Amino acid sequence: MKTLFFNSVFDITDKVLKNLDIKCILLDIDNTVRPFGNVNPHNGADEWIRGVEKIGVKVILCSNNFKKNVAPLAKKLNCDYVSFCLKPSPIGFIRGKIKSHTNHKQILVVGDQLFTDILGGKLLLLKTALVEPIDLEAEAKTLKIRRFLLKGLAEKIKKRGSPFL
Ligand SMILES: [Mg+2]
């Protein structure tokens, strides 16, 4: 399936998840549910996670960050996590999939970066959704360069959007 695009995780609604038959979201953290470099989740992230859980969707945070960085946020958001994912290598997503006890086809990878989140999901043939980053300004230079290089592809995915909205 082609990568879907949403302006933010908040646009990934119950309706979208039901249409895609999703039971687990492997969710990126930085610039997806919290502004880059911030320790706290984005406003509304907690409520959004509780909402999707209500319809039977498990959320597992999957981050390339170290445990000491990821665990406190997972505690705040009250969800399971996989740290040091090494995205785009599929290792972290495989660990997330095992934790989820979910059928492969019912997993959605969500993140703001094509080179890590989306590529990692694609390598495992998982469903993928790209979201607009929360805050680009605070990002590291290397990430800005990567984003610039992949801008064309990101625009293509954005134009396509999601047929489920
Ligand atoms: Mg990110």
Image: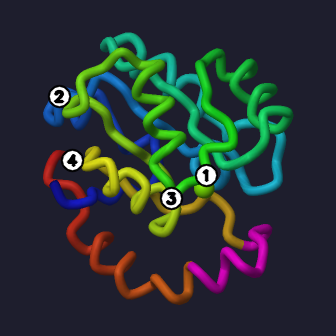
Marks 1 and 4: CB-CB under 8 Å? no
Tell me how far mark 4 sits from mark 2, CA to CA. 14 Å
Whether residue 162 appears in magenta in the rendering, the answer is: no
Q: Which residue is mark 4?
A: 165
Q: How is the image coloured?
A: rainbow
Element carrying mark 1: loop
Q: Position of residue 139 (x, y in %)?
A: 75, 69
Q: Earlier in the sequence, mark 1 or mark 4?
A: 1
Location of residue 119 by image quarter: bottom left
Marks 4 and 2: CB-CB under 8 Å? no
Tell me how far mark 1 sits from mark 3, CA to CA. 6 Å
Tell me how far mark 1 sits from mark 2, CA to CA. 27 Å
Q: Residues within 10 Å of mark 4 (few under 14, many from 20)?
A: few
Label 4 lies in ligand 1 vicinity (Cβ under 8 Å): no
Q: Which quadrant does ligand 1 occupy? A: bottom right
Element carrying mark 3: loop
Foreground: disc 2 or disc 3: 3
Return the mark for residue 21: 2
Which residues fall within the magenta stretch?
A: 137-146
Q: Position of residue 5 (x, y in %)?
A: 32, 59
Return the mark for residue 88: 3
Q: Residues within 10 Å of mark 2 (few under 14, many from 20)?
A: some
Foreground: disc 1 or disc 2: 1
Q: Which residue is mark 1?
A: 86
